[in-house]
């Protein structure tokens, strides 16, 4: 089945500023289905460290992929009592309704159908950790437009498309960083010296 790019993401801003909560495994009061396997647990823990907006985008993408499967379970909104009980358990995934709902919906799948979704969680969290590292390397602010672009590439071309997009972004950030560095260097040169250099040319 052809996969389409996600639409209608609601983001608070065009940049990602607030990091998600993180608790050590020993502080979890109740283990979930994704805590039982180290591979899955690490992928979900990585997701929970993402900024709010990025975490929401990844979850929306997971739901988009899930909805394209036959007889896919429907995500259920959490009631007030359910939300209270979840937060009392202090699992990091309980702090955001969309994250909790997405993971709970995937958990309803039988194991053979769940495993591809687990791989998708791993692919997306690995890709976006690389994206955040890229932004940090070039002192750039992560933004929603670039994240949407990478998610669209993943949905259309999988991991290969996502990492091709990362390579292109890396080149763009490198060029911007070089231009910014040159401009800062130019501004740091005294005006008389710049005039002298212009005459020599």
Image (cartoon, grey):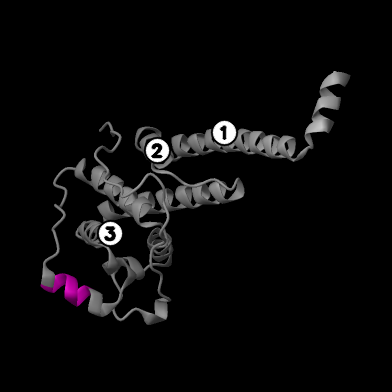
How many residues crowd mark 2 within 10 Å: few (<14), some (14–19), many (20+)? few
Q: Position of residue 108 (x, y in %)?
A: 19, 59
The residue labelled by disc 2 is 145
- Mark toward the start of the polypeptide (3 vs 1): 3
Identify whether 39 is placed above or below 175. Answer: below
Stretch in magenta? 81-86
Q: What's the CA distance linking mark 3 and mark 1?
A: 31 Å
Label ID, residue 99: 3
Label ID, residue 4: none
Residue drawn at x 36%, y 49% is: 120
Which one is in front in this view, the residue at disc 2 or the one at disc 3? 2
Most distant residue in the front direction? 192
The residue labelled by disc 1 is 172
How many residues crowd mark 1 within 10 Å: few (<14), some (14–19), many (20+)? few
- Mark toward the start of the polypeptide (1 vs 2): 2
Residue drawn at x 48%, y 35% is: 165
- Which of 31/131 is in front? 131
Q: Position of residue 166 (x, y in %)?
A: 51, 39
Residue drawn at x 34%, y 37% is: 155
Side of 199 where 81 appears, left or right: left
Q: Is 85 included in the stretch rendered in magenta?
A: yes
Q: Is residue 116 visible?
A: no
């Amino acid at each position: 089945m052809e996969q389409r790019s996600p639409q209608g993401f609601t983001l608070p801003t065009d940049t990602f500023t607030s990091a998600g909560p993180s608790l050590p495994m020993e502080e979890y009061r109740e283990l979930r289905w994704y805590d039982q396997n180290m591979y899955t647990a690490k992928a979900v823990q990585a997701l929970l460290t993402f900024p709010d907006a990025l975490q929401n985008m990844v979850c929306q993408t997971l739901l988009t992929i899930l909805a394209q499967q036959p007889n896919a379970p429907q995500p259920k909104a959490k009631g007030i009592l359910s939300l209270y009980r979840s937060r009392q358990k202090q699992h990091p995934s309980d702090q955001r309704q969309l994250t909790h709902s997405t993971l709970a919906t995937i958990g309803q799948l039988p194991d053979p159908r769940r495993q591809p979704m687990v791989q998708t969680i791993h692919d997306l969290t690995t890709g976006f950790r690389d994206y955040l590292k890229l932004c940090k390397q070039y002192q750039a602010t992560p933004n929603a437009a670039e994240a949407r672009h990478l998610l669209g590439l993943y949905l259309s071309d999988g991991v290969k498309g996502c990492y091709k997009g990362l390579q292109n972004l890396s080149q763009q950030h490198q060029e911007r960083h070089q231009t910014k560095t040159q401009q800062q260097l130019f501004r740091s040169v005294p005006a008389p010296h710049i005039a002298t250099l212009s005459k020599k040319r």
